[in-house]
Image: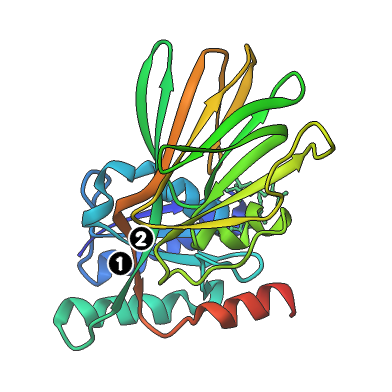
Amino acid sequence: MRYYVLDRGDQLSVDLSEQFHKIASQRGFQLDAESPEIVISIGGDGTMLQAFHTFVDHIPDIAFVGVHTGHLGFYADWKADELPQLIELMSASTTGSLKPRIVQYPLLELEIQRKSGKTTYIALNEFTLKGVDGTVVAQVDINDQTFEMFRGDGICISTPSGSTAYNKSLGGAMVHPTIEALQIAEIASINNRVFRTMGSPLLLPKHHHCDIYSRKDQRLLLTIDHVNIQVDDLISVRCLVAKEKVSFARYRPFPFWNRVREAFLG
Ligand code: NAP
């Protein structure tokens, strides 16, 4: 099995990473930083975001596994002291005596059009557009029809698995990752007699898209998961459910609603 490990960098995560390499080499796993089949993230959900973006160009060929060294995560389900058990199960999968379930989650595709050119990105959690100097003015189109003129702090477009992250703080719905959709949530919109936005989060199916057009000269902060890009020449951003999905290898069940309950209700 070709594998790669990415850790958060704290002492516990680094120690676990070393422990993983040691046992993995005894089991005949091959460390492969170029084309791994399995990528193990050790840390938290933020570490999984980093692992995802490290291998974003190889997503169809990789299955991710998350080990958490803090609280239970949405992407990181294995506890630190369960590492030997995880490697045991991974080893059994190489001999064919156990097959992990591969679950696939939808992703968000972004086409960012600037005066300087177009760039495409993929997000695991979400994309946000915020003003650097003040109120954002942006036109939101859905399926090429003008929907609303937005004024406020910003707009968040999330994936179903990202719906429990920033989107949740904005009052968005938590969406089961089997639902292929993207969610639009407002960040502090201005609503009065002059300016009006829908005010509710919107869920778009996979065959719909939305476009956000910058409608004034403004410096904007575009964030794709944990990656920030500041721009002053944005024309538009097209958001759609990506054709590819991210895969997670499940060596035991990890139901989404259990994770929601444990993360938010304890
Ligand atoms: P961070 O600010 O250090 O961490 C943000 C928190 O979000 C961490 O507790 C992280 O969990 C958690 N998280 C990440 N993905 C999640 C998911 N899918 N469901 C539930 N919780 C999740 O930043 P970071 O670690 O680089 O993560 C970037 C993410 O932070 C962004 O994608 C965005 O969703 C989130 N964020 C949230 C807010 C907000 O809620 N107001 C504001 C900005 C950004 P771990 O501790 O397990 O890593």
State left or right for residue 84 relative to residue 264: left
Picture quadrant where residue 79 is located:
bottom right
- The quadrant of the picture occupied by the C terminus is bottom right
Q: Position of residue 48 (x, y in %)?
A: 48, 55
Relative vertical location of residue 205 with respect to residue 240 in this rendering, above or below: below
| Mark 1: amino acid | Ala
Query: Is residue 39 or residue 13 the one in the foreground?
Result: 39
Disc number for residue 52: none
Disc 1 element? helix
Q: CA distance from mark 1 to mark 2?
A: 5 Å
Picture quadrant where residue 20 is located:
bottom left
Disc 1 crowd rating (10 Å Cα; few below 14, some 14-19, many 20+) is: many
State left or right for residue 42 relative to residue 30: right
Q: Position of residue 237 (x, y in %)?
A: 46, 31
Q: In this figure, which residue is indicated by the disc labeled 2?
A: 21
Query: Is residue 120 or residue 34 the one in the foreground?
Result: 120
Disc 2 crowd rating (10 Å Cα; few below 14, some 14-19, many 20+) is: some
Label 1 with label 2: CB-CB less than 8 Å: yes
**Quick check: is the Cβ at mark 1 less than 8 Å away from ligand 1?**
no
| Mark 2: amino acid | His
Q: Position of residue 243 (x, y in %)?
A: 27, 52
Picture quadrant where residue 207 is located:
bottom left
Relative vertical location of residue 10 with respect to residue 224 in this rendering, above or below: below
Q: In the image as oriented, which residue stretches furthest toward the right?
A: 192
Is residue 17 visible from the viewing direction of this image?
Answer: yes
